[in-house]
Amino acid sequence: MTDPRPRLFRFRRDLRLRDNDGLAAAAGGGPVVPVFVLDPETEALGAAAKWRLGRALGELARSLEAAGSRLVSRRGEAGAVLRALARETGAGAVHWSRSYEPEVAARDERIAAALRAEGVAAIAHPGFLLREPWAVETGAGGSYKVFTPFAKAAGAGPVAECAAAPELHAPEKWPRSEDRDAWALGAAMDRGAAVVAGYAAPGEAAALARLDAFLDGPVADYPRDRDRTDRAGTSGLSEHLTWGEIAPRRIWHAAERAGGAAAFRRELLWREFAWHLMWHTPRIAERNWRESWDAFPWRRDNGEAEAWRRGMTGEPMVDAGMREMFVTGRMHNRVRMIVASYLTKNLLTHWTVGLDWFAECLTDWDPASNALNWQWVAGSGPDAAPFFRVFNPRTQAEKFDPEGIYRARWIAGFGDGAPGREARDFFAAAPRAWGLDIADPRPEPIADLGATRARALDAYRATRGG
């Protein structure tokens, strides 16, 4: 017989109703109480990510209300909050989607043990990835360290089918919910919040619309246009995947129905690879994945890195990317590689300096993907680009922004004509303490590209013993 007691479902990075196995299981035949817990770990998110989370929660709450339910929001240590809610509601079980950060997974196990000790079932479900990280193994039974064989293994075999939103039955009495507005999740964004809001599209409905728009046209030219910064050739789904507003399996199947879209689905597998590595080698988020790189003479934070953060290096392609991120919370993927190469090689600055700034500024911040990408560019990670591959921002601009459209979009004074909205928005979003004025001339280059490239290669050869 079905247990008549309510079930709690804890939302985290799965802020959607469709394709949500944990929510469907919790809702299976009985009342369900959807819950979001603002725990200390979530409060520690960077400014842009936390602001974007607040917007996503607002959209999720509206979706739940339209389905006859509601989102109960509480602040505090997750285990204590969930145990208290279970007692208040008489819940017989707590469901959630798994996290694949080993530290978080270990904390989840402790929470589950505490709930079970009080007679409450604790059930974790998949839902964040196409495959569980431990389910993709080499022939010898170990984890993958190179992307191409990983992609071949992870891309083979069936992917779980899409599922409709479950019917949600309300409990007889709803527990108290805190006022999320009082949490002020966007406070650290200061005046930048109003600017970034004009470029964000939070929520499950927006994610589905974006996927449809991409599959209706741009996907056909994705292999050709994905690196072109002057064209709308990418899906824009990164912010939705980060917060689970759309399931990767829905994107996978939709792309397959659109004629394969192999290059596009390969990017989903790169994300899978990042989380596979995070699960098996969690040091990737904080330390050089290749320990031999610990001796490399990267500089820690410095004045040139500050100019990089502010989009004031004097290299238009670099500055355009940094300003795009500050205004929109995202950055074109090709430009992410260019700005990362410039910081780690031309400015010889440790990749963690850049990773930390991205964590502060990205609305699509993903701890696994960003760690892998930074270490890939820097040369210290698994399956990394050779260190001597230095992205020259000027030749990259000639190839991927040949008419200067991208640079003019983000940099006031680049090209002909008055600055457009995007270029002006950077000065509206930038902290007043930076003292930037749109009327000021563009900065001169702070680094000689040839000399700094040679310096980086000399350091690499010296570290490697010649």
Image: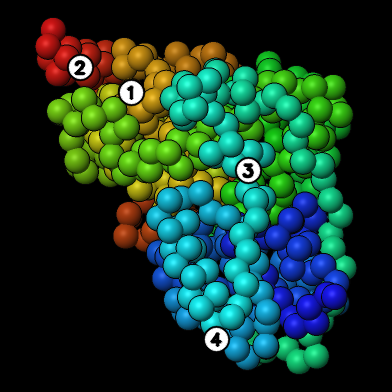
Q: Secondary structure at mark 4?
A: helix
In primary-sequence order, the first of circles 3 and 2 is 3
Say the numbered circle drawn on residue 460. Answer: 2
| Quarter of the image that includes the C terminus | top left
Q: Give how far across and how far down residue 444 sits, in percent.
A: 30, 30
Mark 3 residue type: Leu
Say the numbered circle drawn on residue 129. Answer: 3
In primary-sequence order, the first of circles 4 and 1 is 4
Query: Relative to the observer, which residue lies in front, 136 or 35?
Result: 136
Q: Which residue is mark 1?
A: 379
Number of the front mark, 2 or 4: 4
Number of the front mark, 4 or 1: 4
Circles 1 and 2, Cβ within 8 Å, touching? The answer is yes
In primary-sequence order, the first of circles 2 and 4 is 4
Q: Image check: 339 left or right of 208? A: left
Q: Identify the residue at horizontal 67%, vertical 26% (top origin).
A: 155
| Quarter of the image that includes the N terminus | bottom right
Q: Which residue is mark 4?
A: 84
